[in-house]
Amino acid sequence: MSDENTPNRRIDEIRDSALSFKVGDESEGEIRAIIPIQNNLYVVKDRVIYSVILADDIDPNRTREDIPNAMQKVVEAGALDDVVIRTFLTGYGLFRKERVAVGVDYEAALLVVFDIMEDLLSAKSIISDIEDVILKNREKKIYPEGGVVVLPSLPNIGARTKSVIQKIDHALINIYKLACVFYGEETLRGAGPWLDGLSKYLSGTLAGDEKFVEVAKNIAVFGKAARNVRHCIEHPKSGQRIVLTDYQISPNKNLVEPSIEVIHKDTPFEKACISDFMNYLLDSTLTGAELLMAFLAAYHMAPLGGFEIGVGEIPVDQRRDGVRYGYLINLGGKLHRLG
């Protein structure tokens, strides 16, 4: 960058001019949000997310006029996807410089939310593939030939299950990291191990009837159960293991779909359809992340003059891009979405 006493060079005029270029193509839908985080600029379209890399990030000393801006598709899902809505878009609405209290690193929070989104999208993709296999096999007719029936199968059932469980566990690790952005890792570790630390810290600093305390306890309980599921699949033993069953035929000749059972003394799960179990893990993690973001924002709001503001569920007719939680302002006794 040239200083104010130096005549602008041609490269400065190029770099400082208004930025305008096409992002992706029409098949990816419309642009719903442009989210700046530190040196990254994320463009959220209906079906994908791009990262835009500015020429100044590539060539910060402005040495070459021919260095272009660049873009890269980083996520194969966008503003029409429920996971993107309930993580990244929700986080962007809640964690903004003008909304959060001074001292909160809102950009660090958004980067962690982005990681949570990626973990859950990866899990969702695997679950979707499993559901596709199950739906296709439901359309098949099974006929014995020569006293033998050929059963369908769910290929790589063990590897797929392990991958989903690991992604869920990693998302929960990032949920804990998100809490650490606001309260500090040392503080939460001092209160208790992992997600219990958040729960115990809030229990000791907030009134017992606070809704945030209840939410944090529920996240901790679920996190412990999900971690135990991971232990079961990564460190199996007699009282700690997962029983995966591929397609079977019952004594009354019905086709039984793939199932999973978690054997653990503290957090067992009865035998269930594998896709139902995986969706339970995904939905519970997603709900925990969404609620945690809302409460973190609610307890770390910057003041807005003399106006009464809060964080809560946005009235349905005021929601944008499906985002459920945001800032609300009381005007004349009626809540309105702020911004």
Image: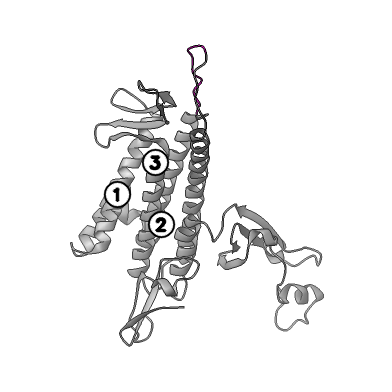
Categorize mark 3 by other alpha carbons within 10 Å: few (<14), some (14-19), many (20+): some
Residue 86's place in the image compared with 141, above or below, is below
Verify CB contact (< 8 Å) between mark 3 and mark 1.
no
Sequence order check: which comes first, mark 2 or mark 1?
2
| Magenta span | 146-153
SS state under label 3: helix
Residue 276 bears which disc, if any? Answer: 3
Residue lying at the far top of the rendered structure: 146
* Residue pointed to by mark 2: 178
Question: Which circle marks residue 142 in the picture?
Answer: none
| Amino acid residing under circle 3 | Asp
The answer to whether 298 is drawn above or below residue 287 in the figure is: below
Instruction: Identify the residue position indicated by label 1 in the image.
Output: 220
* Residue 101 belongs to magenta span: no
Q: Does the magenta stretch include residue 148?
A: yes
Disc 1 element: helix
